């Protein structure tokens, strides 16, 4: 793997991790919101 | 560099690799796996965001037009589940058809045939989206909505993609049901029951799908022929397809007026439906009555296809406006 390819590899991995973290955070927030709505309904 | 992979991730050079068969849809072509980890944008592209927009919109319209109220968080969850299911089914569709997509100019740059995503990764991603969508819908919204959502995924990914599409020119007619579920699910998310009105919303999209797709099929006919997909123009011929486009447009016209006839929608929707569906029929007439010459740019066909997309957005928007004004 050339230095350029390695840099691209790391950039892709970083962006994927970031998006995955955001999705997980969104999922947790959604489940929390659904629980609150269901409990208070 | 890893060995080329088949659709199912097998090494095509090994003894266990799937070999090409007589049926085009099951033909296996070596796919170059991505050397780099796939970019998240490729996963996003795999969900067919353009189709999701239409699915989300019609699902939201079904939800907003339904009688009754739904908590915004639950409503949002229902729409999110519909979007995830549509995206997941689209991913599974592309995973299954990766070898066919490689043969068509229109689809060759998709992430799997282009080698940007490994087929196995796409399959897992699609399964995950579908599974979570049904789970969340069931837990947050209701089991009836979740059951219909699960059925719609199976309908698209299995009945349409695997069974109908490679076998019959009626693939679009029956497969159109897959895209017709969102407003039905949106409506049921609010009411919790199946009544005549959501069934009519289903029927509208069901009747809209054949003229929409056949207009497209007329100008990408060589693509479908190259991939061996039995689309109507390739099997029944252009003349028959063109007549059928007009026939379905007339049936669509009548179907869109049915909600007014049963008292499920008011005059705002009725006027919009008559106007929009009338234009749809008018645009179908030149498509039905002509046969293209050589080097024809197929303008009427492209015009009908473009209008059919705007048509569905406008029709469902009119339904929501009508409901809000009446409410």
Image (tube, grey):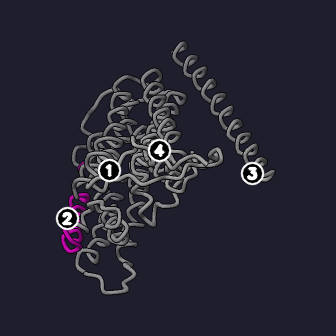
Instruction: Report if residue B52 lies within the magenta region.
Output: no
Mark linked to residue B26 = 1
Q: Examine the rendering and report whether any part of residue B41 can be seen.
A: yes
Q: Which residue is mark 2?
A: B247
**Element under disc 2:** helix
Q: In the rendered view, would you say B218 is above or below B140?
A: below
Q: Which residue is mark 4?
A: B11
1 vs 2, front mark:
1
Instruction: Report if residue B238 lies within the magenta region.
Output: yes
Q: Which badge, 4 or 2, comes first in the chain's sequence?
A: 4
Number of numbered tags placed on the structure image: 4
On the rendered image, what quadrant is the C terminus of chain B found in?
top left
Q: What is the distance, in whole Å, between disc 4 and disc 2 at their CAs? A: 47 Å
Residue B208's quadrant in the figure? bottom left
Q: In the rendered view, would you say B191 is above or below A16?
A: above
Q: Which residues are magenta?
A: B236-258
3 vs 4, front mark:
4
Q: Which badge, 1 or 4, comes first in the chain's sequence?
A: 4
Q: What is the distance, in whole Å, between disc 3 and disc 2 at their CAs? A: 55 Å
Decide which of B163, A34 is in the foreground and name it.
B163
């Amino acid at each position: 793997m050339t230095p350029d390819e390695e840099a691209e590899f790391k950039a892709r991995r970083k962006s994927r991790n970031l998006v995955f973290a955001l999705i997980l955070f969104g999922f947790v927030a959604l489940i929390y919101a659904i629980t609150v709505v269901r409990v208070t309904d | 560099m890893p060995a080329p992979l088949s659709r199912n991730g097998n090494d095509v050079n090994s003894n266990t690799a799937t070999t090409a068969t007589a049926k085009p849809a099951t033909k296996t072509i070596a796919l170059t796996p991505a050397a780099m980890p796939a970019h998240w944008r490729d996963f996003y592209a795999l969900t067919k965001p353009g189709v999701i927009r239409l699915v989300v919109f019609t699902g939201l319209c079904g939800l907003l037009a339904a009688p009754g109220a739904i908590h915004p968080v639950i409503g949002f969850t229902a729409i999110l589940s519909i979007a995830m299911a549509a995206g997941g089914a689209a991913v599974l569709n592309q995973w299954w058809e990766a070898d066919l997509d490689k043969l068509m100019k229109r689809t060759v740059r998709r992430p799997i045939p282009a080698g940007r995503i490994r087929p196995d990764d796409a399959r897992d991603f699609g399964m995950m989206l579908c599974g979570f969508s049904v789970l969340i819908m069931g837990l947050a919204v209701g089991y009836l909505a979740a059951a219909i959502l699960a059925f719609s995924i199976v309908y698209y990914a299995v009945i349409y993609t695997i069974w109908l599409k490679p076998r019959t020119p009626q693939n679009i007619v029956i497969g159109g049901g897959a895209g017709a579920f969102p407003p039905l699910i949106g409506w049921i998310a609010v009411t919790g029951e199946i009544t005549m009105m959501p069934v009519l919303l289903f029927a509208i999209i069901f009747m809209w799908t054949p003229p929409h797709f056949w207009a497209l099929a007329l100008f990408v006919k060589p693509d479908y022929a190259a991939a061996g997909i039995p689309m109507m123009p390739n099997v029944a011929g252009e003349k028959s397809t063109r007549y059928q486009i007009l026939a379905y447009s007339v049936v669509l016209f009548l179907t869109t007026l049915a909600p007014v006839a049963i008292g499920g929608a008011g005059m705002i929707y009725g006027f919009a439906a008559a106007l929009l569906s009338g234009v749809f029929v008018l645009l179908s007439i030149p498509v039905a009555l002509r046969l293209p010459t050589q080097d024809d740019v197929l303008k009427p066909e492209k015009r009908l296809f473009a209008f059919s997309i705007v048509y569905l957005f406008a029709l469902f928007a009119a339904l929501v406006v009508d409901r809000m004004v009446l409410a």
